[in-house]
Image: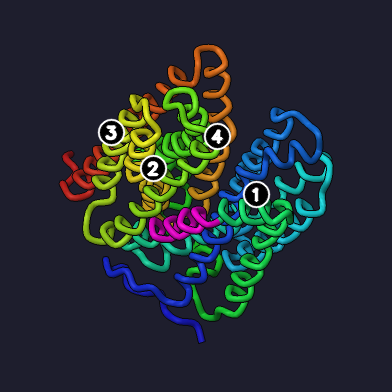
Amino acid sequence: MRRAARPRDRAFRRDRLTLTLDGAFVTWGWFLYAFGPIVPEIAREQDVSFALAGLHGTAMALGSVASGSITPTIARRYGRRVQHLLGTAAIVVGTVALVAGTTLAATLPAVFVLSLGGNLTLTAAQPALVVHHGSAGPSAVTEANGMGSGIGILAPLAVGVALGAGWGWRPAVAITVLLAVGVGVAMATLRGEPALDRPPPPPPGRAADVRFPPELWFFWASMVCGSAIEFSTTFWAADLLQTRAGASVSVATAAVTGLIAGMTASRFVLGPLAARKAPEKLLLVGYAVALVGWGLFWTATTPVGAVVGLTVAGLGYGPHYPLSVALVLRAAGSRPDKAQGIASIGVGAAVGGAPFALGALADAVGTHRAFLVVAVLIVAGGAAVALGLRAVHRGLRQRVLPTLP
């Protein structure tokens, strides 16, 4: 028997559906944060340049864009459960192909398929969390992303252990299959969950209204800036640590864990807090903290100071993506799957473009000066949130005040 949809109160109650949807973030987080350390290993194994190996990142971004393009159609026709299971199948196929591949012709398509599948599960899970938890959706989405970044602390360590033991990088990446299958089985056995069904059609009075409200686009801009900030820092922080703070390669690489740890901590703290406080204001605080952390990191001349800056920056970075995308989905009203598709395209563009643009600028002016771009993105993201909050208040006033003749 189908359960009735839950009332949209501010309470955030975790149940079996919540934990199953969280599993999508854990699975993707494991692969995402294991992926970075294996790219140099793939380059050495295949005897290709780092630039060619970097095309795996481009393949991942294209997978996100492709997912965003097809998500609304799949969700509308088949429902979010089917979308999630299709994504799970693609993760398994992509991971097996990546582990078995020994040439770029094999591993590049494998990463694309894996990214397509991972993003299909996420673009099913995030709207489902928002629908399932109602006004507590930002809390649910933020905590789920915290689980994804939390597992990201362990994934690089697993890669290091596998490499140190002489097994190569493949066993650590293969764990992705086990996680995906486990979550897929849990999803397939869930019954009577309206959040996993096909989304309802728009209300009759709004069927012809295909435009999203202005606040959605401001929060979308915040999400794109936040994604660009996170991945630009993740890609290039280690190099800045070496050139500016004099850290060794191993110390610089390990120090990036401070960024991930800060992001994870802030997401777990802000998850419950977003059920009681305005998520827009929490997001503004996040951008302010991010700017402070960036300043500490950018001016640091010792490894310790740089790690402190990265950790503070991580505390600020943490809410950027999850709260922004939750606000995008909230602003979409009855069309969260369409909004999620647009969000995935934006994230794919940010992930595929920002780190490489910063790298190109670093080649011209040096990594230290190029890192000023991150500060510009932080300011732009904060401004987008402020404009989005203003648009929300304006919309509320228009709905409350009577229309003048």
Relative horizontal placement of residue 401, taking residue 284 as reference (left or right): left
Residue identified by numbered label 1: 115
User: What amino acid type is highlighted by mark number 2?
Assistant: Leu
Distance in Å between CA atoms under marks 3 and 1: 32 Å
**Residue lying at 71% horizontally and 63% vertically, measured from the top left:** 89
Q: Nearer the viewer, mark 2 or mark 1?
A: 1
Residue identified by numbered label 2: 216
Between 248 and 132, the one lying in front of the other is 248
The magenta stretch is: 141-154
Kindly indicate the quadrant of the structure image that contains residue 315: top left
Residue 401 x %, y %: 16, 46
How would you rate the neighbour count of disc 4 (Cα within 10 Å): few for under 14, some for 14-19, many for 20 or more?
few
Residue identified by numbered label 4: 249
N-term-proximal mark, 1 vs 4: 1
Q: Secondary structure at mark 2?
A: helix
User: What amino acid type is highlighted by mark number 1?
Assistant: Ser
Between 172 and 94, the one lying in front of the other is 172
Between 354 and 202, the one lying in front of the other is 354
Relative horizontal placement of residue 111, taking residue 100 as reference (left or right): left
N-term-proximal mark, 4 vs 3: 4
Relative horizontal placement of residue 155, taking residue 181 as reference (left or right): left
Distance in Å between CA atoms under marks 1 and 4: 28 Å
Residue 168 x %, y %: 73, 52
Q: Secondary structure at mark 3?
A: helix
User: What amino acid type is highlighted by mark number 4?
Assistant: Val
User: What amino acid type is highlighted by mark number 3?
Assistant: Val
Image quarter of the C terminus: top left
**Residue lying at 53% horizontally and 19% vertically, measured from the top left:** 362
